[in-house]
Amino acid sequence: MTCHNWEEQAKQFTTDLGVRSVSIRTGVVLSKSSELIKKAVLPTRFWLAAPLGKGSQYINWIHIDDLCQIYIKAIEDESMQGAYNAVAPEDNTNAQFMKTIADLLHKPMFMPRIPEFVFKLFLGEASQIILEGSRISSQKIQDAGYDFKYTTLHQALKDILFNRKKKKSKK
């Protein structure tokens, strides 16, 4: 509801003032410092990877690099107007997300699902994003000419878990 109200207010810039406005609806941002990555990787390193809640709920994710580039495109591309979803083109469930992390870390995933109430205690209100899930399309931003650098969860997580360390150590 908040997102809808915010987008309606942004539209008024266009209708009332003739100023172009672009709203970016952002999925779960994957970066080295994201809480989701930290909280998913830690138990996985100790062989405790497990789907959260039902596991079948979708996670709409986006790599931090793609998100930054979408914002730049929205500023520079004057043909863009209205709302765009900043989510990767690949649909993934929570179980697929956890399995990808386990595979990349070469750890098994044999633990039973973590009940929703436990996850709510662990993440609080932020757990709703993960536990409820929804499928959101990135087609509109792609139609506007944006080409994702990270189109698969495997690519994105591999970069975050391994390549980011190398980039930092070069400094």
Image (cartoon, rainbow, N blue to C red):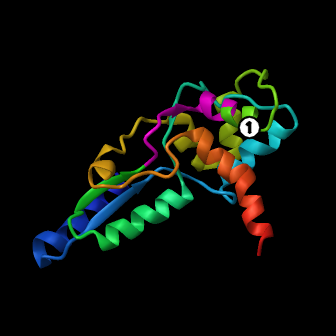
Quarter holding residue 44: top right
Residue type indicated by callout 1 = Leu
Q: Secondary structure at mark 1?
A: helix
Residue 4 at x, y percent in the picture: 30, 54
| Point 65% across, 31% down: residue | 52
| Point 72% across, 65% down: residue | 167
Q: Position of 65 compared to 8: left or right?
A: right
Quadrant (top left/top right/bottom left/bottom right) for the C terminus: bottom right
Q: Is residue 94 magenta?
A: yes
Residue 7 at x, y percent in the picture: 28, 60
Residue 89 at x, y percent in the picture: 43, 41
Q: Position of 151 compared to 70: left or right?
A: right
Would you call the spot at circle 1 few (<14 residues within 10 Å), some (14-19), or many (20 or more)?
few
Front residue of this view, candidates 121 and 105: 105
Front residue of this view, candidates 162 and 54: 162
Mark 1, residue position: 104
Residue 60 at x, y percent in the picture: 48, 42
| Point 65% across, 56% down: residue | 34
Q: Position of 116 compared to 78: left or right?
A: right
Q: Which residues are magenta?
A: 87-99
Q: Is residue 75 magenta?
A: no
Q: Position of 133 compared to 145: left or right?
A: right
